[in-house]
Image: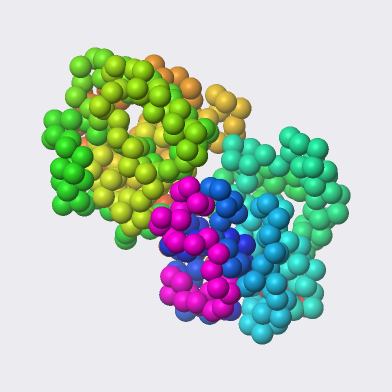
Amino acid sequence: MRIVHIEAYYPSKLGYHLSYIAPYQKRKGNDVFVITSDRLWPSQKDYESTLRPILGPRCVASGVYTENDVSTYRLGSFEYKVICYLRGLRRLLERIRPDMVHVHHVFWNPAAIQTALWKPKLGYGLLYDSHVADYNTNLRGTMIKNMVSMGFQLYVSPLLKHRADFITAIGESERDVLCRELRLKPEDIPIIPLGTDIQAFRFDAQRRCAVRQMLSIGNEELMILTSGKITRDKDIPILLEAFARVVALGIPSRLVIVGNGPEDYLGNLKKIIMHNEYLQGKVTFIGAVPHSDLVSYYSAADVGVWAGGPTISIREAIACSLPVIIADNTTCGYAYSGEELVSRGNGVRFPRGDAYVLSEQLVMLFRNDRAREHMRMIARRFAEEELSWDVIADSYLELYKEALRRNHRES
């Protein structure tokens, strides 16, 4: 099968969705290509503050590259805010002649519209996925956004629904948005979640010792970790409040925050720490690190905590045998509950925004070594059986095959 993945912004070194799906599908014997833009991130400001130290310049030369062992075409592009138009996309598709086109991100994506228009002529199967949920993207809220969304519903949605073989979501919240904005039924939207590289992410005792030594964290101290992009929706102040309660009880512990975010927000967090005697000297900001280095921090930690919106970091931490505490986001009106991520008993949830309950859970895990070790064992098995990118990539391959069978019957 000749498969083309189209994603406007593809930072291949960061270990996102496409970085794993495309190489795995190639290893399964398919001819796989990635088409993307000559840009690495949709926001110049965010890129400069968080990713440039890792990835280098945001704009790269157009051309053909080998990224994650897959032929990657970086096309010249035109950009307006988060909307990115790829120049020469049709000519390239005509040259590759794919059996299946997988467009990543269906909303506000010119490539989604273009591939729908060209499908009858070029004869490929077509699948869209969506990562947009109310907790991470506001498709409305301003006059311009409302106008664009209304136009999308009236003119674009019917075309996409008619031409797509499948429109998928990575979770229930994302499916809810698709139902609302494209007026689809939930049963018509397969959910294929994000996965984890279980080969790269596994517990490493040597790395654990190295990181704890580097951070001067003793064996008797509980290392609490959170990671990912540090933004307001991650509820870091709630985590700080809960952690301060733990320290106030005299429990030897440290909080390590891995990731970067807007400078003004990070400054506010540091002010919270500076004005709380229990937090001073107990919280360490690591900043953004290469994706391959995250396994060292997950291995070093005793408990991973994500107090706010969901992130792929949770799955990677689970693969490293780390017990997790995550927010039940239903308390803030979100459909996402996170229940599936702790369904095996590898962690617990708390009501989002409740620092007291979070602190109680941290204390419970600190005082119960056997519970932590049991969660560690369960976590790894859970990752291998359900969270692996191989499992996720196979799920997409099954949909591709079904799409081609449908098109063959119709032709």
**On the rendered image, what quadrant is the N terminus found in?**
bottom right
> Left or right: 266 with respect to 92?
left
Residue drawn at (70%, 72%), measured in percent from left and top? 87
Q: Please, which residue is most extreme toward the left here?
A: 219
Residue placed most toward the observer, 277 or 133: 277
Q: Is residue 182 visible?
A: yes
Q: Residue 114 location in percent, x, y?
A: 76, 67
Q: Quadrant of residue 84?
A: bottom right
Residue drawn at (53%, 48%), measured in percent from left and top? 46
Q: Residue 362 location in percent, x, y?
A: 30, 25
Residue placed most toward the observer, 206 or 61: 61
How many labels sit on residues?
0
The magenta span reads: 47-74
In the rendered view, tell whether residue 313 sits above or below residue 309: below
Is 69 inside the magenta-drawn segment?
yes
Residue placed most toward the observer, 4 or 83: 83
Q: Quadrant of residue 3?
A: bottom right
Q: Please, which residue is most extreme toward the right here?
A: 154
> Left or right: 258 with respect to 157?
left
> Left or right: 24 with respect to 210?
right
In the rendered view, tell whether residue 290 sits above or below residue 306: below
**On the rendered image, what quadrant is the C terminus found in?**
bottom right
In the rendered view, tell whether residue 232 sits above or below residue 125: above
Is 239 inside the magenta-drawn segment?
no
Q: Residue 335 location in percent, x, y?
A: 59, 34
Q: Residue 47 location in percent, x, y?
A: 52, 52
> Left or right: 340 with respect to 158?
left
Q: Is residue 124 visible?
A: no
